[in-house]
Image: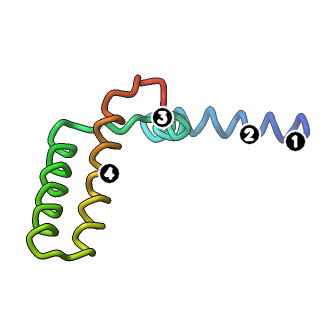
Amino acid sequence: MLSHDDREQLKKIEEWFEAAEPALAASFRRIGDRRRFRIGKVLPVCVDVLAGFLLTLAVITANATLVLAGMLALVIGVGLHLARHLPADQS
């Protein structure tokens, strides 16, 4: 807990800082704001295409590693599609 004098000093420093560098002070105020990363349409579709390619290649080559990689890409693609449709207030 700060003393009354310390709080007054901090208030003066804050006022000076806002007067001297208003843009920097505003950017510091926005640090705590939650921002939502917008997922476009292209990324989920690209991940879907990659998953399809990997799974097709896995069937052709009978490679278990490609099956796992394709399934992982498929799960990530589904997650991206679902994340695109979340309301803005959820994270």
The image quadrant of residue 40 is top left
From the image, tell me which residue sits under label 2: 10
Query: Which of labels 2 and 3 is toward the front?
Result: 3
Q: Residue 2 has which mark?
A: 1
Q: Position of residue 59 (x, y in %)?
A: 13, 67
The residue at 29%/58% (across/down) is 71
Residue under the point 20% across and 76% down: 63
Give me the residue at 80% from left, 34% from top. 8
As measured in the structure, the alpha-carbon distance from the residue carrying label 3 to the one carrying label 1 is: 35 Å
Write down the residue under mark 3: 91
Q: Which of the two labelled residues, at mark 1 and mark 2, occupies the earlier sequence position?
A: 1
Label 1 SS = loop
Going by the image, does 12 lie left or right of 84? Answer: right
Mark number displayed over residue 76: 4
- Local packing at callout 2 (Cα closer than 10 Å; few below 14, some 14-19, many 20+) is few
Eye-nearest disc, 4 or 2: 4
- Amino acid beneath label 1: Leu
Label 3, secondary structure: give it: loop
Image marks 2 and 3: residues in contact by CB distance under 8 Å: no
Give the residue type at disc 4. Answer: Ile
